[in-house]
């Protein structure tokens, strides 16, 4: 409760009366500050309404350079003979107290969306991270090893994929991301966020038009381009830097097919340079680089490619833009979203079996591509959208220009690769990006612009602070299309003398001996489920035992430390068998404990079918 500091008293009021009024108001404020309302917590740090929205962040950098020769992706099939510069995963976790968002930037060329789906499923099962809150974006270096199944490239360029899939390296890459996210979660600190723009001339349109009106891979200084650098800086609470996220459109092709040394190419060299100057990791996020190349392209070795010069051409420009970010804020709210754009697929085009969920037959022999678009909104001025494609820059430029958000960024090569997506006008020029490696028609540009703009101007704009004050409405929980059952506090029923639903935290708190939560669920079939608990607790109150039980099975566990009442953590607590049909799931203390203490705060329990891909 906030009260005005101005008190209107009649001039004739005695000093005693004045003192009494001020004392009474002070007591009201004091009582309100300690009153056990739905927005406050009685134990440890008080995560009341005024403390909600504590923004925390962490960054981890993990080496994924192989120690033996690997098949390189990009250009023709070829095997590495050594290492020019090392390649990495760079992982940032952003957590505003309600939403956790994980962004991974990897020095890899492309992956199939099925590879992303597989890893996202593992993260959901093991850590409870919803797929829409996990983005895996690739720098698009053409001098890094292949990862996972070829996916759509095998349809376009099957001659490059006659060798077996490197399952060992793929598993290594996946596990390093999982380990990195676990590590980052342990390193979360209070943070601040700033945003800004920069400019660099390190890139150029690569659709060179010949006298016959045909496009070829080359240099086109008159062609469409995007030279903007989009920056997000994360600082620690004391203002010292924690991480930088840099968004710039450029192919990772300074090194050409003759190069057999593993390299992060331009994105990797620039990232290492900026990190050396700032002393913190930088995530390089590629943009709409479908028709954009580095100004030095496809040279046989790093010297000929002027690779080191990109430290000045792009790296110094990132550093200059970073210096211009003068304001940061610790008041950060994150909102994520996702929807599918369906656009016609080229006629008579084959489709890989691992990507069945990314296409659909609409009858009469016609098919559509199902493009997943991801969105991240940060406060009211930053909107980031992503696609698993090589987008032509004119499309992202137009969306940025029309967007209601002053900072609108496009993250390309994110969560897979579904080919090049050109503008409608570029189809008349043909060329590699249009004729060879694109599954789309001239309708794709309009479908993407319309779909993304509708979301930016509609659903994303409605995601405002009021979303955080949720309502507890116990209701039947049924599995989604993936079979996952999400038992949120909003849909559960708190039963007992002390338990309360805390809207600002979307969680049940004040959880003592005689309290429990019940959910009604309706699984479709008998299955085993990996069970992930999302909870918070002070270190002093951690360690008490709990039980989660259904009519068929139960899990007994111990409440682990999350760091504080304001800090929510997620962890797999076991595996549970469920029978099909309507039933109850109950979460409660397993043993009695000091009635002055609490068990935990529960935000959700996620049940993921075991073995789900």
Image (cartoon, helix red, strand yellow):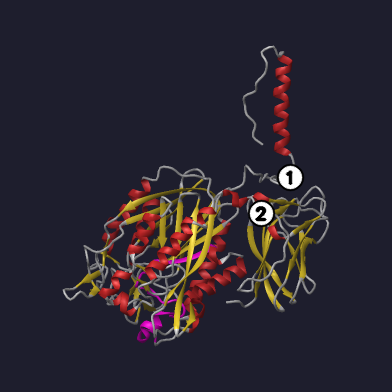
Q: Residues within 10 Å of mark 1 (few under 14, many from 20)?
A: some
Q: Find the residue positioned furthest to the left.
A: 211
Tell me which residue sits at (66%, 44%) in the image: 48
Tell me which residue sits at (43%, 42%) in the image: 327
Q: Which residues are magenta?
A: 133-161
Q: Where the N terminus falls, by quadrant?
A: top right
Q: Nearer the viewer, mark 1 or mark 2?
A: 2
Marking on residue 506: 2
Which one is in front, 164 or 66? 164
The kind of secondary structure element at disc 1 is: loop
From the top left corner, tell me how far across and down residue 287 is, in percent.
37, 62
Can you say whether 142 is above or below 311 in the image? below
Please check the rendered image and state whether residue 552 is part of the magenta-colored stretch, yes or no.
no
Q: Find the residue positioned furthest to the top.
A: 12
Q: CA distance from mark 1 to mark 2?
A: 17 Å
Please check the rendered image and state whether residue 146 is part of the magenta-colored stretch, yes or no.
yes
From the top left corner, tell me how far across and down residue 3 is, in percent.
65, 31
Which one is in front, 487 or 545? 487
Marking on residue 42: 1
């Amino acid at each position: 409760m906030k009260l005005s500091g101005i008190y209107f008293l009649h001039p004739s009021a005695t000093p005693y009366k004045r003192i009494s009024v001020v004392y009474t108001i002070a007591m009201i404020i004091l009582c309100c500050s300690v009153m056990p309302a739905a927005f406050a917590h009685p134990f440890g740090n008080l995560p009341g309404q005024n403390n909600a929205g504590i923004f925390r962040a962490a960054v981890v950098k993990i080496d994924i350079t192989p120690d033996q020769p690997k098949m390189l992706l990009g250009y023709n099939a070829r095997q590495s003979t050594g290492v020019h510069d090392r390649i990495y995963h760079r992982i940032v976790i952003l957590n505003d107290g309600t939403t956790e968002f994980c962004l991974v930037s990897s020095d890899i060329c492309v992956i199939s969306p099925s590879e992303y789906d597989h890893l996202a499923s593992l993260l959901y099962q093991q850590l409870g991270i919803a797929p829409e809150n996990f983005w895996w974006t690739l720098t698009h270096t053409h001098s890094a090893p292949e990862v996972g199944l070829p996916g759509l490239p095998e349809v376009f360029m099957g001659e490059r994929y006659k060798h077996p899939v490197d399952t060992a390296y793929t598993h290594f890459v996946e596990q390093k991301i999982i380990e990195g996210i676990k590590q980052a979660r342990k390193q979360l600190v209070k943070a601040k966020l700033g945003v800004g723009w920069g400019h660099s001339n390190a890139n150029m349109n690569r659709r060179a038009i010949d006298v016959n009106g045909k496009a070829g891979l080359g240099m086109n200084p008159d062609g469409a381009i995007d030279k903007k650098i989009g920056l997000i800086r994360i600082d620690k609470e004391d203002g010292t830097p924690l991480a930088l996220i840099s968004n710039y459109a450029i192919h990772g092709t300074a090194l050409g097919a003759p190069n057999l040394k593993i390299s992060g190419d331009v994105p990797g060299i620039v990232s290492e340079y900026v990190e050396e100057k700032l002393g913190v990791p930088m995530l390089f996020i590629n943009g709409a680089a479908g028709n954009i190349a580095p100004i030095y392209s496809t040279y046989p070795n790093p010297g000929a490619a002027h690779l080191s010069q990109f430290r000045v051409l792009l790296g110094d420009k990132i550093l200059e833009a970073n210096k211009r970010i003068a304001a940061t804020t610790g008041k950060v709210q994150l909102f994520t979203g996702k929807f599918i754009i369906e656009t016609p697929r080229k006629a008579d085009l084959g489709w890989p079996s691992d990507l069945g969920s990314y296409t659909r037959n609409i009858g009469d022999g016609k098919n559509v591509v199902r493009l997943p678009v991801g969105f991240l909104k940060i406060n009211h001025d930053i909107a980031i959208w992503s696609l698993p494609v090589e987008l032509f820059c004119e499309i992202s430029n137009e969306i940025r220009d029309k967007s209601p958000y002053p900072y609108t960024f496009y993250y390309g090569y994110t969560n897979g690769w579904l080919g090049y997506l050109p503008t409608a006008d570029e189809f008349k020029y043909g060329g590699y990006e249009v004729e060879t490696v694109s599954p789309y028609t001239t309708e794709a540009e309009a479908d993407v612009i319309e779909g993304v703009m509708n979301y930016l101007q509609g659903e994303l704009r409605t995601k405002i602070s009021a979303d955080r004050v949720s309502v507890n409405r116990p209701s039947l929980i049924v599995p989604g299309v993936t079979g996952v059952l999400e038992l949120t506090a909003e849909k559960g029923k708190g039963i007992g003398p002390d338990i309360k639903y805390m809207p600002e935290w979307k969680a049940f708190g004040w959880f003592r001996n005689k309290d429990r939560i019940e959910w009604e669920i309706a699984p479709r079939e008998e299955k085993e489920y990996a069970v992930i608990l999302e909870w918070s607790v002070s270190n002093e109150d951690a360690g008490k035992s709990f039980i989660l039980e259904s009519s068929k099975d139960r899990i007994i566990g111990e409440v682990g430390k999350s760091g504080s009442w304001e800090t929510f953590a997620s962890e797999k607590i076991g595996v549970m068998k469920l029978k099909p049909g309507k039933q109850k799931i109950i979460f409660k203390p397993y043993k009695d404990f000091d009635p002055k203490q609490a068990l935990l705060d529960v935000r959700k329990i996620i049940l993921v079918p075991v073995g789900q891909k």
